[in-house]
Image (cartoon, grey):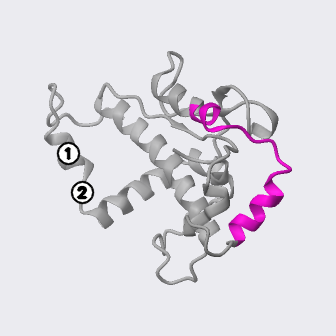
Amino acid sequence: MSSGTANFGRIDFDDLQWERRRYRPGASYAQSKLANLMFTRQLAAHADAYGWPLLSTAAHPGFTRTNLQTAGRELGPDRPSLTSRLAAVGRLLPSQGVEPGAEPLLYAATGPEAAQGAYYGPTGRFQLVGPAGPARITRRALDPAANARLWTASERLTGVRLADCAAAAPHGTAGRRPTA
């Protein structure tokens, strides 16, 4: 699951976990949503290369009315956050309920026309509301070298390597090398 906020994301490969720079919640959120798109694209590339029968897609809900905008990171009523104060300004933007906001995610997961590595979201005003359909992928997530670099950094940080998982894969794919 991504967000339109991914358009504002930047991946700092020298400080992926915000350990050396001052933490900024909005920038961190945008980075995480960009990373979601990059992983979607990279997983799609791996699935194709290994011949895996899986579909890797991404989606965003548009501007969906939930408590995330009002509660922010506090998720409680104690003190209004900057996020909740900015949400008041957001009331000027078109928004939609939770049910239509879930449609792009459902389409990405089950739509008969959902495509490998594609991104889906609302297609109405400002791509914040409306029926689900293809969404524009920010150019930062269309860079195969950056996507692969983020994937490799994640393998290093987690200690889990795709090559190890691929070797143990069922359905006759064990040990199969990527074709691309």
Return the residue found at the far right: 92
Q: Quadrant of the C terminus?
A: top left
Left or right side of 45 for 31: right
Left or right side of 100 for 39: left
User: Tag 2 or tag 1, which sits nearer the N-term?
Assistant: 2
Gap in angstroms between the C-alphas marked 1 and 2: 8 Å
Query: Is there a contact, CB below 8 Å, between mark 1 and mark 2?
Result: yes
Q: Camera-side residue: 176 or 42?
A: 42
Q: Residue at x 17, y 36 (%)?
A: 169
Q: Is residue 177 inside the magenta stretch?
A: no
The picture quadrant where one finds residue 103 is top right
Return the residue found at the far front: 77
Kind of residue sitting beneath label 2:
Val
Q: Which residue is mark 1?
A: 165
Kind of residue sitting beneath label 1:
Cys
Vertical comparison of 115 with 39: above or below: above
Vertical comparison of 94 with 113: above or below: below
Q: Position of residue 142 (x, y in %)?
A: 58, 44
* Residues in magenta, as a range: 82-102
| Dominant secondary structure, magenta | helix
Question: What is the tally of numbered marks visible in this picture?
Answer: 2
Q: Which residue is mark 2?
A: 160
Vertical comparison of 178 with 27: above or below: above
- Label 2 packing within 10 angstroms: few (<14), some (14-19), many (20+): few
The picture quadrant where one finds residue 28 is bottom right
